[in-house]
Amino acid sequence: MADLPILQFEETIMKAVEENTVVVIIGETGSGKSTQLSQILHRRGYTKSGIVGVTQPRRVAAVSVARRVSQELGVRLGDEVGYAIRFEDRTSERTRIKYLTDGVLLRESLSNPELDQYSVVILDEAHERSLNTDILLGLMKRLVKRRASNFKVLITSATLDGEKVSQFFSECPVVRVPGKLFPVEIVYSHERPISYLESSLATALDIHMKEGEGDVLIFMTGQDDIDKLVSKLEDRVRSLEEGSCMDAIILPLHGSLQPEMQVRVFGPRPPNCRRFIVATNIAETSLTVDGVVYVIDSGYVKQRQYNPSTGMYSLDVVQISKVQAHQRAGRAGRTRPGKCYRLYPSAVYEDEFLDVTIPEIQRSSLAGSVLYLKSLDLPDIDILKFDFLDSPSPESLQDALKQLYLIDAIDENGLITRIGKTMAELPLEPSLSRTLMEANEHGCLSQALTVAAMLSAETTLLPSRSKNTEKKRKHDYLDLPDGSGWGDHIQLLQIYECWHQANYDIDWCKDYQLQVRGMKFVKDVRRQLSQIMQKIAKGPLDVQTSRRWKESQQDYHNLRRALCVGYANQLAERMVYHNGYRTLGFKPQVVQVHPSSVLKPDDEGKLPDYVVYQELIATSRPYLRTVCAVNIAWVTPILDKVNKININKLSGGIGRIEEHTEENMSDVPKTENVVAAIPDDHESKIQAARERFLARKGKK
DNA sequence: GAGCACTGC
């Protein structure tokens, strides 16, 4: 601890902090910023007038850093040093240093916008530019003006980003603290590889034959590529075994990895062995593997982005940024000098790579964030003029406003409604919050709570796919409920109700191949949501059991109606001649129900005329994921409302945004007309042909 | 009959 670089800069940092309200700290990996900044401030008396709060983008980081600081100070975790993450608040009245996720700090500022219990807020890892950190940056800018006399903000960032953050906070000082990484030699390829899979393979084998001891970390874009490379490596390494003096262990590493495999990655390495860890960008920041000396960087990452004009997400393989490349290389220098093989020429790095990754705020739907900011009800904040470090596009903000208006969270003048206020208190996306509110009016709150909780964790419920489990499933595993013909939301409800009736038995989950951790998470979320809804609940919150068939059907009916209100901005209409759908409310998109959906055609081979969908995502093609059948009678009033949207009024009637987007404004009613009216002859023929083509393609 | 990178309240 004593030789951490940051401690040599204590005087410099403290001088800057004493003379300024905001200070940017550029601290490379290993500088000790996460554990030491808070302790320095503590030593210098900043915890006398309030708490020093340190935000982290990830829960594990908040917990582990808090634990280490409590050890270094020799105090019990939860006393002077504590942490707060979702479902877990380990702080007390004695807590002076508090580590928390950025999301938790945002929640706190909802009930206490001035954050007056804090004397200092440190936004750690701000260069990662998580959505929550970006919102906090904007809020901090406002807050330092109001609390200049008794409040300090420290922001830690990366070399390439520090000046920008400083400019954002009126040229505040920047203190640079070196890291404690070993040097990493960068080796560029002479040419772009034809296949980065093959190139990774060749480089890995080359390292194995020629280089000394040390593990190899290989960055790939997704699970498919990881699986392919792992099996190729296994084949080739085996045939090389004679000539090599080390054994090889080849390990995949990605988000949906089973815990047993994670033990093999993070556990002790057998002697005279080289591990090849084939990972997604999870190994960039979230997980650190000890013993890595060589890194192979393809230069690509799979990224999720949102298109506000279509309401569609897509998963694209894109080039990484310079900051990301630097971060990946750094993974080779943690234990001793290392090497990073970049599978691209240095000219590509220099000329094509962006300096920093496009921040999440410019790649996501902003409905939730805009609702949150509106609910803060700060008189001096206008949402469309909100001071972001990087502003989202006007289209994105308008899209958020339209979404919020359609689900009654804001009124036609863009002002937050009573419903919207309550929605913002729920840790859910606005559509689900609205569904809960509506369900509360129709006596199915308990069921809606279950669905909302299940949807919060849906991706972690199903087991990670592999040929092995596919086989097992066919043989031994039980079939899940089928949604009674109404679709995936109802199925999720039924699954949870079954689990409830099985007394939340772990083995029950295993019988149905459901991820135990995911299901436990759902239970926690459901409890949290119930607590928040308690004060306004008009009916029971507990899981309903032993209902008759007829009662269940009535519940499903009410629940589907509530979903239709909540997902008013995510409706789709089946096309006349086949089972393709067209999205409503946005620029219409021709889409298919995702094959994983439980929704199946009826006796006449038709899917429901109208559905709500949880997500519109383009992977190989545009898909609706997680759908629920709704009635046309519920849809019609929503479409009327869509047609009457006046984005000018919603934006508060202020000229700034409208000026830039004249075309877009006129686009709104036009778009809806395409949906409502019959297209002219020529267009309709082309459209029909296209739909038939897509349908055929869909059948194949 | 296709597939989902990673976080967080």
Image: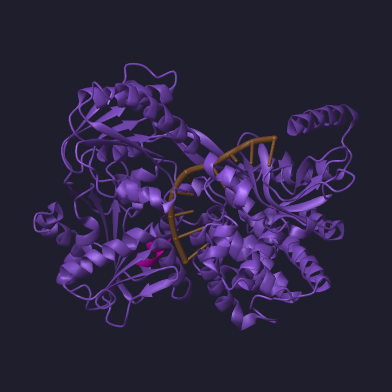
Chain colours: A purple, B brown
Please check the rendered image and state whether residue A140 is part of the magenta-colored stretch, yes or no: yes
Residue nearest the observer in this picture, A70 or A108: A70
Q: Where on the picture, by quarter, is residue A552?
A: bottom right
Q: Residue A69, image x and y in percent?
A: 21, 66
Whether residue A274 is visible, yes or no, is yes
Q: Residue A479, image x and y in percent?
A: 67, 55
The residue positioned 61% from the left and 71% from the top of the image is A502
Q: Residue A8, image x and y in percent?
A: 9, 55
> Quick check: A255 left or right of A682?
left
Whether residue A457 is visible, yes or no, is no
Q: How many marks?
A: 0
Magenta residues: mostly which secondary structure? helix
Q: Which residues are magenta?
A: A139-144
Q: Is residue A82 above or below residue A337?
A: below
Q: Is residue A353 above or below residue A507?
A: above
Residue projecting furthest to the front = A475
> Quick check: A101 left or right of A646?
left
